[in-house]
Amino acid sequence: MGNRKQPFGYRIEQGQIVLHPKEAKLVRWIFTQYNSGNAYSTLVDMLKEQEVAYDEGKLWNKNMVARILQDTRYVGDGRYPAIITQNEMDAALDKRKKKCVWTDNAKTNKLLRQLSGRQYIEGMEQRVLHLLNTLILHPEQIQEEEKVSDTRQLQAQQGKLDELLNCQPIDEESAKKLIHEIAAMQYTMLGSDKYESQRLRNLFRQREVMKELDIGFLKSTVSEIISGGNGRICLKLKNGQVIGRSETT
């Protein structure tokens, strides 16, 4: 019997079925990730980024993942040495029966990938949850960011108006024009960011600390998930503010 006729994770050596080290390690990883809440589609995306193939020359797909997750030989049946425990297998088989859990996880992972632009999202859900819960506890951290260039332009126009008003006789037409320009600039600077920031503060004040990530709340508050080094992430809120740059957030 050739090696590729064996279940993924095993190979033949001197007529005996033994573990294939790299494949067996991946089998354990697949069960761990699946039992931790990751959906088939998420696992496939992750598996495509690593070098161990299920079949030489073929990309990983959902059928391959499903075949592994339902193969009871991985717990050991005499001929096959165990790769995982019976508890891990039972957990995976039980999870397959709960379609609603599968659907929720798939939707959450899909949204995380959309917002971050990344395929590999291991651990991202918990980090996003932590940042959102921080804002739920401290909604006062949500502030519209002052646009320095607009502020300088407003100050310049205000300076021109002051000079004009101090010059006698006053050029009323020019003064009216400057006043209208300043008023328009002030209105623009109030803009949507201020109202969006207030909307966000209200949302976070009304929300209780979450034990699990609510994708509806995530959609309504976050426009982008920014990935940094060492697995660190920041959240760009709907008002343009970035949360997570400092250790306090």
Image (cartoon, rainbow, N blue to C red):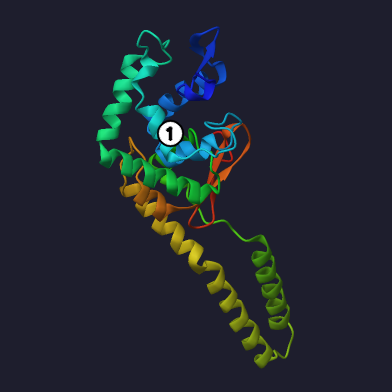
Horizontal placement of 37 versus 172: left or right? Answer: left
Q: Is residue 207 above or below residue 172?
A: above
Q: Residue furthest front?
A: 1
Q: Is residue 195 above or below residue 90?
A: below
Q: Residue at x 62, y 81 (%)?
A: 181
235 left or right of 204? Answer: right
Image coords of residue 67 (percent x, y): 39, 31
- Quadrant of the image occupied by residue 185: bottom right
Q: Position of residue 2 (x, y in %)?
A: 53, 20
Find numbered disc 1 in the image and state the secondary structure of the residue it sits on. helix
**What residue appears at the point 69 percent right and 65 percent down from the top-left corner?**
152
- The residue nearer to you, when weighing 245 against 126, is 126
- Name the residue type under label 1: Val
Q: Residue 9 at x, y = what percent?
A: 49, 20
Whether residue 210 is visible to the viewer of this picture, yes or no, is yes
* Residue tagged 1: 65
Residue 215 point in image, percent of width and height: 37, 48
Report whether residue 248 is seen: no
Front residue of 45/140: it is 45
Question: In the image shown, does 194 or 51 lie closer to the viewer?
Answer: 51
The residue shown at (65%, 83%) is 178
Residue that appears at 65% across and 70% down: 154
| Labels in figure, total | 1
